[in-house]
Amino acid sequence: MDKILIHGGRKLHGTVRISGSKNSALPILAATLLTKEPCTISNVPDLSDIHYMLQILSHLGGQVERASGTVRVSAESIRSEAPYDIVRKMRASVCVLGPLLGRQKEAVVSLPGGCVIGDRPIDLHLKGFEALGAVSRIEHGNVKIFASQLRGANVNLRGKNGPTVLGTDNVMMAAVLAEGTTVIDSAAAEPEVVDLANFLNKMGAKITGAGTRRIVIEGVKELHGADHSVIPDRIETGTYLVAGAMMGGEVEIQRADPEHLGSVIEAVRGSGYSVETTRDTIRVRGNGSPKPLTLTTEPYPGFPTDMQAQMCALLCKTKGISVISETIFPQRYMHVSELKRMGADISLDGHTAVIKGVDILSGAPVMASDLRASAALVLAGLQADGITEVNRVYHIDRGYESIDDKLNQLGAQLDRVKV
Ligand code: EPU
């Protein structure tokens, strides 16, 4: 188990390159199961979650070859069962359900367990599959889904906290091989859903409306192989945007897609930082007197829940009172108690965090608990006096490719220590 020591207080300058999106790559890799023909996916980030997905694909019968950022999957004949040992390490393994159901008309996948960011049910995924004519049941910790035939249907995927990203992906992946037309209302509109739909269309699917709240899928008989390059990771981009704002200097983020970060850029600008964009770069400059913010997380294009913790870290040292409301995962505040150990003044009231800016954060040993909470601790460590020791770094390695190297290139000092 590695830990990272962060020597705080160093200004960041220079350029950083963004990797492919984890949350796009995972369902896109799962979608390669929908065809017997080989698919080649490029700009795949080197992350532990991606390794788990490749293990799942291999277990299901896919031939997987990987060379640097390119993965070739050939799933000529596959099985429909993914047991606990294989899927337990990553909740996103549920996104093999849709492709298995679409192609095999059955799927048996161990249910994802609880998760520190809150309850992670899959009722909406199952509602979508059932609308297509499938039957599902939970048995011995597995979800079993089968259908004699999948038929297009209308389904509304709105849950109590809004649309579901992987649920939309899953239903879309099953519906591409259903007979007739499927309409998903209250669909998730995240860029990762659009990226998946673009890949499926390259495979011969007929999907329109991805990126809006209504997706229409005209079923086809079969899909063929395709090549695809994954979009840049907007959450990694946002994390370096916040790092550059709090510690710049001037930081240029390259190979990004600023269009996917409208609400994040607006928030950082709203705090008084200068942010300039081109088609694929973002340049951010530090600001002597940033302003506090009031933010609410929302489905895309609103402010992403996956950037909430990092924004908390930024606002810890921003004079005045900031207020963050988390509406997607209302309990997603594991970073708060660790930030408080570093001197932050944050109080929680239900799903709202009230942050009073302090002058100083002080380095401390802290515990990473989930991916984005860990990113927030790294960001806090950059701003803190002295040394911050972030333990359980494997949480960060799930979603940030070489975060220590990338920040060090910008002038930070992070040392990875093998424990
Ligand atoms: N929900 C239900 N029923 C369902 C599914 C979801 O009630 O069947 C609820 C959830 O409990 C939550 C809300 O709907 O309150 C939204 O959850 P969603 O299903 O959209 O989350 P997800 O698809 O499981 C993806 C990302 C998350 C990201 C969320 C929200 C992947 C692999 N994961 O999860 O990313 O936070 O969408 O944008 O795409 C991360 O990268 O750190 C991460 C957690």
Image (cartoon, rainbow, N blue to C red):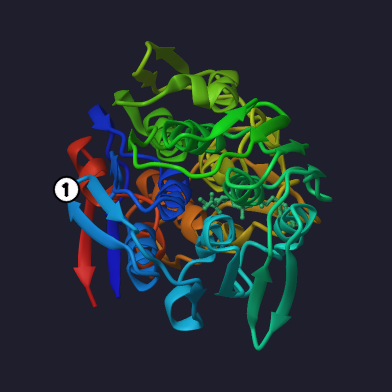
Q: Position of residue 35 (x, y in %)?
A: 41, 50
The residue carrying mark 1 is 68
The furthest residue to the bottom: 140
- Dot 1 falls on a residue whose secondary structure is loop
Q: Is residue 281 above or below residue 111?
A: above
Would residue 222 be visible to someone looking at this image?
yes
Given the image, on which type of amino acid does mark 1 rest?
Answer: Ser
User: Which of the 4 quarters of the picture holds residue 56?
Assistant: bottom left
**Residue found at x 50% / y 81%:** 84
Q: Quadrant of the C terminus?
A: bottom left
Q: Is residue 289 visible?
A: no
Outermost left residue: 67
Looking at the rendering, in which quadrant would you find the N terminus? bottom left
User: As drawn, is 364 to the left or to the right of 45?
Assistant: right
State whether label 1 is within 8 Å of ligand 1.
no
Q: How far across and down, in percent of the image, does residue 191 sit?
A: 53, 32
Q: Nearer the viewer, residue 49 or 101?
A: 101
Location of residue 360 in the rendering, given as x and y in whole percent from the top left corner: 47, 46
At 30% from the left edge and 47% from the top edge, which residue is drawn?
45
In the displayed structure image, the side of residue 157 where residue 359 appears, left or right: left
Nearer-the-camera pick, 93 or 246: 93
Rendering coords of residue 46 (x, y %): 27, 52
Total marks in image: 1
